[in-house]
Image (cartoon, grey):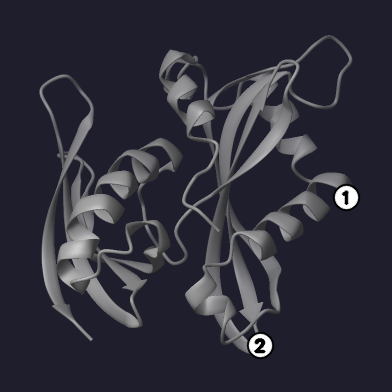
Amino acid sequence: MTYLPAAALLAALAAGSAVGQQPPNSPNVQRLREFIGTPEHLQAVRAAISAFEPTALAAACKDVRPTKGRAWQPVEEPVFDPGAKTPKNAAWQETWEVNACGKSGVRSVGFVARHGQGIVPLPMFPGESLADLKLQHDAGQLALTDAAPAALRCEERGRIQVIDSAVISRPDAARRQWSERWTVAGCGRTADIHVDFRPDPQGGLVYEFRNQPRR
């Protein structure tokens, strides 16, 4: 698996309608909630989680099955045609508890719907990362092309993957800042990267990496 092959769809999120500008329980968000509970969508979730399992983890266990939905989050305000059950335009992410060959874990997956393109699943990091779909893409691209190769001393940039994520400093809700540990794998080694998130003056979030020794 390559990291976020549908990056063009994620780039389009910047032009989308932010869900924070709409009522959190707007009718269209409720319709999206109903859609993601349909058997057809749950089948798509299972397929996406299996397909996006990092190679380094799949080498030890290929049977990763979602067992319980933990949370979901709209990333942009969904749009539906009248009477339609499937969104015409939307972006959201879902977090699931999984069973991986008898071991429990957490997996997240994103979805982007665009008119005429259907619904495309997008991989997210395994583990507990609090970064949303767009933030994982932006920070993840930099991590995999710069911070991870340096931490691993590995030049195989196209094969480096994030195999786990954990929150190491809980977020300050008022100041919107927290820290995470991302475990990366490549060249037969693993390493931890610490990433600090904090708000910028424009109302977004910026991030900074701190590498840890490889294993």
Left-right relation of 209 to 15:
left
From the top left corner, tell me how far across and down residue 25 is, in percent. Answer: 59, 26
From the top left corner, tell me how far across and down residue 64 is, in percent. Answer: 67, 74
Residue closest to the eye, 5 or 206: 5
Residue closest to the eye, 6 or 159: 159
Q: Amino acid at mark 2?
A: Cys
Kindly report the distance in space between the C-alpha atoms of the residues bearing marks 1 and 2.
24 Å
Q: Quadrant of the N terminus?
A: bottom right
Q: What residue lies at 58% left-to-right and 66% top-to-bottom?
A: 53
From the top left corner, tell me how far across and down residue 15 is, in percent. Answer: 44, 13
Residue sitting farthest toward the top: 82
When asked about the image quadrant of residue 169, the answer is: bottom left
Q: Amino acid at mark 1?
A: Pro
Residue sitting farthest toward the front: 155
Q: What residue lies at 68% left-to-right and 55% top-to-bottom?
A: 48
Q: Is there CB contact under 8 Å for labels 1 and 2?
A: no
Left-right relation of 173 to 158:
left
Residue depth check, mark 1 versus mark 2: number of the one nearer the observer: 2
Q: How many marks?
A: 2
Report which residue position mark 1 lands on. Answer: 39
Does residue 150 lie above or below 81 as drawn?
below
Does residue 79 lie above or below 4 as drawn?
above
* Residue 38 seen by the camera: no
Q: How packed is label 1: few (under 14 Cα within 10 Å), some, or many (20 or more)?
A: few
Report which residue position mark 2 lands on. Answer: 101
When asked about the image quadrant of residue 213, the answer is: bottom left
Residue sitting farthest toward the bottom: 102
Does residue 54 lie above or below 95 as drawn?
below
Q: What residue lies at 57% left-to-right and 51% top-to-bottom?
A: 109
Disc nearer the start of the sequence (1/2): 1
- Dot label at residue 165: none
